[in-house]
Structures are given as structure tokens and as C-alpha cells.
Amino acid sequence: MLEADFRLSLNKDLDVLSASDRVEGLLGYASQDFLSAKVSIEKILHLNDAAKVRHIFDPAVKKQSGELNVRFRHADGRIRGLSRYTAALERGASPRHRGPGNSDGGRPL
């Protein structure tokens, strides 16, 4: 099972505040690539999931917890579906995301 942790800023660009080293195994990019903004969540997010993700991370949305199913483009060009529970750490804090791919038995996208 592949798993990585992200903390995202609830801004327009969903800046990555922290990313575990395991992100490279999951998405093919080093955590430093996300932290330095060389790679962004927005750029590797599947176009058909962009509106859903923007809604989920909109600071005006009161419920920022729940199941999250999105697709990302891996560094090698393949599409990787991620499914994971999302929870806000505290009111006004960035949500934390843990993301194994569908290999853990999550719903297929």
C-alpha cells in the first residue's frame, strides 16, 4: 500500500505546506518538488476533478471533512486515483490528507 501525508494551504493555489518523503513513491515527485513549488497540486490534478477539489478546499465551505476521491497525473504520465478521508485539524487550519492509491481496496474512480 502506498501512502503519503500532505498539508495544504487553503489558498487559491493549494500550496503544499508539508509533504512526507513517501510522496515520491505515490506520485513520482520528491517532497521538495512540492515544497519549492516546482510541482503544484493544481498542475498534476486531473482536469475533471479540479472543480470538486476547489470546492472541498474552499475556506467558505463549512464541512471540510469527509471522503475524497481524486485523480492525479504521476510523474511518469499515468493517472493515479487516490481515495482517502480528509479532516480539518482545527477551525481555520489546513486539512490533512493521507492518500493511498486504489491498491488499498478504496473505491475505483
Image (cartoon, rainbow, N blue to C red):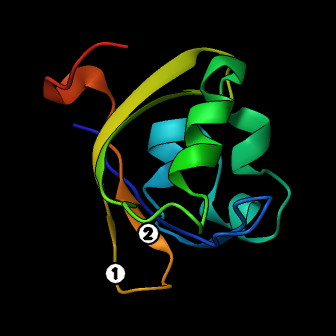
Q: Does residue 23 lie above or below 79 as drawn?
A: below
Q: Is mark 2 on a helix, strand or loop?
A: strand
> Do we see residue 74 in this rendering?
no
Q: Where is residue 100 in the image (x, y as percent from the top left)?
A: 30, 40
Mark 2 closeness class: few <14, some 14–19, many ≥20 residues within 10 Å: many
Task: Identify which residue is drawn at 61% across, 59% down.
Answer: 58
The quadrant where residue 86 appears = bottom left
Label 1 packing within 10 angstroms: few (<14), some (14-19), many (20+): few
Q: What element carries label 1?
A: loop
Q: In this view, does 18 lie above or below 42?
A: below
Q: From mark 2 to mark 1, how far is it between C-alphas? A: 6 Å
Quadrant, the N terminus: top left
Q: In which quarter of the image is the C terminus?
A: top left
> Which mark is drawn over residue 47?
none
Residue at 80% over, 38% down: 43
Residue type, mark 2 in image: Pro
Query: Is 58 drawn above or below residue 2 in the view shown?
Result: below
Farthest residue, direction right: 38
Report x, y in % for residue 30: 64, 55
Q: How many numbered circles are shown?
A: 2
Q: Is residue 44 left or right of residue 71?
A: right
Q: Tags 2 and 1 in contact by the CB under 8 Å rule?
A: yes
Mark yes or no: residue 58 visible. Answer: yes
- Across and down, in percent, residue 80 comes to 49, 22
Residue drawn at (48%, 30%), measured in percent from left and top? 70
Q: Which residue is drawn at 51% across and 76% down?
A: 94
Side of 4 where 56 appears, left or right: right
Residue placed most toward the observer, 102 or 46 = 46
| In this picture, residue 80 sits left or right of residue 30 | left
Judging by the rendered image, the residue that carries numbered circle 2 is 95
Residue on which disc 1 sits:
89
Q: Looking at the picture, how far across and down is residue 40, in whole percent? A: 76, 51
